[in-house]
Amino acid sequence: MPDVLQIGPFQLQGRLLALLLACALGLWLIRRVTQRLLQDTQIVIAKPIEDLIFNGAIIVLLIWKLGVIVMQPFLLWNNPLKLLMVSGSSTEIALGVLIACIYIYYQIRKHRIPLFLVLDVIAVGVTAAVFLFCALIPAYGLPTTVPWGIGVEGTASRFHPYHAYISLLLVPLLIWQHFIELRKKTLGQGVLLKYSLVYGGAAGMLASFFNAAKPTLLYLSTAQLLFLFMLILGMLLPVLTHNTSRKELSTLSQNDSKTQIQQEQQNQEREKAATPAGKEGFVDKKLDGPNRPST
């Protein structure tokens, strides 16, 4: 994809367009997974999962695009039109992800949604989004002489297609997620999240050896530290995973509905008890009872 796309008088950054397409693909797959979850098990919390993930993505996108206002507030009065062309950096993305995680966690606690169910669904969408973004945006790795090396137009130097390596390595993970694991109906047990982190971390670490990145800590680059964290977290997840099957999730949803119905019935009974009865049911202690006057 070119760096800048010209559409009439408008110019659009190729990187931004690729990011939007990747997010759209991830959200579309998340919607498909939640719809399948709703059809297979009638879990009523499938729709809130789709909504809160979509809202979280919007939060990240807005902070990434408008976070430059916090760093450069003078753009508001000096050149406000420049805000349409300027986008944030990795700092704004990290801030947006942090705020989105806080929002999603708050909604999970509020609606009593199982955490691993949400994380499994997110793992499916993120894998697809990363796959498409890496397939569209070129990333130049170490110099190479292999036939599939890529280079800048007008130069003879060739480089490893780092982005293509990550995209190709994610294909088996996508096939496993959609054609094998989702058919086993283990969504919500943390299996998708666990193996997606382990495989994604290992694939990213393997591809990073062909990337020209400077080491920062422990002789590893920032990307390698992230992949190592994913790998370790995925290996530790079996200790944290709870055994929540779809049947239990469906029962939980049904129990929530029954609890709400019972609560409404109790509230109605309390209102009836607090409200005085009509003329027929009204009892006057002065005119009724053992001390009533004789007629």
Image (tube, rainbow, N blue to C red):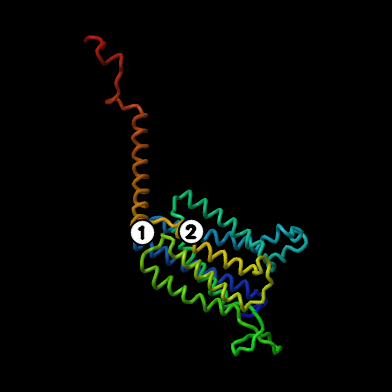
Residue pointed to by mark 2: 51
Where 251 sits versus 179, above or below?
above
Q: Residue at x 67, y 84 (%)?
A: 143
Instruction: Give the secondary structure at mark 2.
Output: helix
**Horizontal arrangement in the rendering, residue 49 relative to residue 84 (left or right):** left
User: Would residue 7 be seen by someone viewing this image from the given angle?
Assistant: no
Q: Position of residue 155 (x, y in %)?
A: 71, 88
Q: Position of residue 145 (x, y in %)?
A: 64, 89
Query: The disc labelled 1 sits on which kind of residue?
Result: Arg
* Of residues 229 and 290, the one drawn nearer to the viewer in this rendering: 229
* Of residues 28 and 185, the one drawn nearer to the viewer in this rendering: 185
**Quarter of the rendering occupied by the N terminus:** bottom right
Q: Position of residue 100 (x, y in %)?
A: 57, 57
Determine the image quadrant of residue 33: bottom left
* Of residues 293 and 98, the one drawn nearer to the viewer in this rendering: 98
- Number of numbered discs visible in the structure rendering: 2
In this rendering, the label closer to the viewer, 1 or 2: 1
Q: Position of residue 223 (x, y in %)?
A: 62, 69
Q: Residue at x 26, y 16 (%)?
A: 288
Residue pointed to by mark 1: 246
Q: Residue at x 61, y 76 (%)?
A: 209
Q: Residue at x 43, y 73 (%)?
A: 176
Residue placed furthest toward the left? 295
Q: How far apart are the two marked residues, 1 and 2, measured between alpha carbons?
A: 20 Å
Q: Residues within 10 Å of mark 1 (few under 14, many from 20)?
A: many
**Horizontal arrangement in the rendering, residue 171 relative to residue 12 (left or right):** left
Instruction: Give the secondary structure at mark 1.
Output: helix
Question: Along the polypeptide, which appears first: circle 1 or circle 2?
Answer: 2
Query: The disc labelled 2 sits on which kind of residue?
Result: Asp
